[in-house]
Image: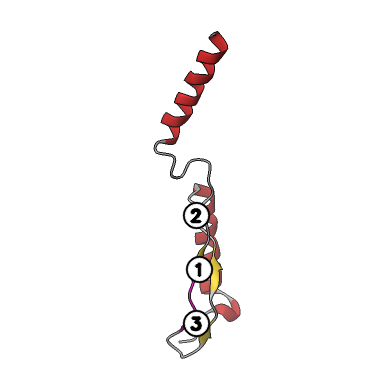
Amino acid sequence: MKLHSLIVICVFILLVACGNGSDCGRGRKPVYVKPSVDYKGKYRKGHLRMPVSTKKDAIKSQNRSRYYYQTRGKYRRKK
């Protein structure tokens, strides 16, 4: 009897922690980006875009990477 009530309490706590269960226990899914044409007239193939991490260190790393590629090398847009 005690084990049964302990299991019920644990399940209840998990349900409360997950809210309505929409995001709990499931990873975010990639989104399909449709093929398109950019402003220079180049064709972009359709592809899957992976979800972006919301961790603090991941955001810091994204900003660092963006700064690097915007300010250095062949990826810099010519003026």
Residue at the extreme right of the image, as rendered:
73
User: Does residue 37 sit above or below 63 in this rendering?
Assistant: below
Q: Write down the region rendered in magenta.
A: 33-37
Q: Which mark is nearer the camera, 1 or 3?
A: 1
Where does label 1 land, which residue?
32
Q: Nearer the viewer, residue 53 or 50?
A: 50
The kind of secondary structure element at disc 3 is loop
Mark 3 vs mark 2, CA separation in Å: 23 Å
Residue at the location (56% across, 78% down)?
A: 75
Residue type indicated by callout 3: Arg
Task: State which quarter of the image contains the C terminus.
Answer: bottom left
Callout 1–callout 3 Cβ contact below 8 Å = no
Q: Which mark is nearer the camera, 3 or 2?
A: 2
Q: Which mark is nearer the camera, 2 or 1?
A: 1
Q: Position of residue 8 (x, y in %)?
A: 49, 20
Where does label 3 land, which residue?
77
2 or 1: tag closer to the N-terminus: 1
Question: Residue 74 lies in what quarter of the image?
Answer: bottom right
Q: Nearer the viewer, residue 56 or 33?
A: 33
Residue type indicated by callout 2: Ile
Residue type indicated by callout 1: Tyr
Helix, strand or loop: magenta stretch: strand
Mark 2 vs mark 1, CA separation in Å: 22 Å
Q: Position of residue 39 (x, y in %)?
A: 42, 86
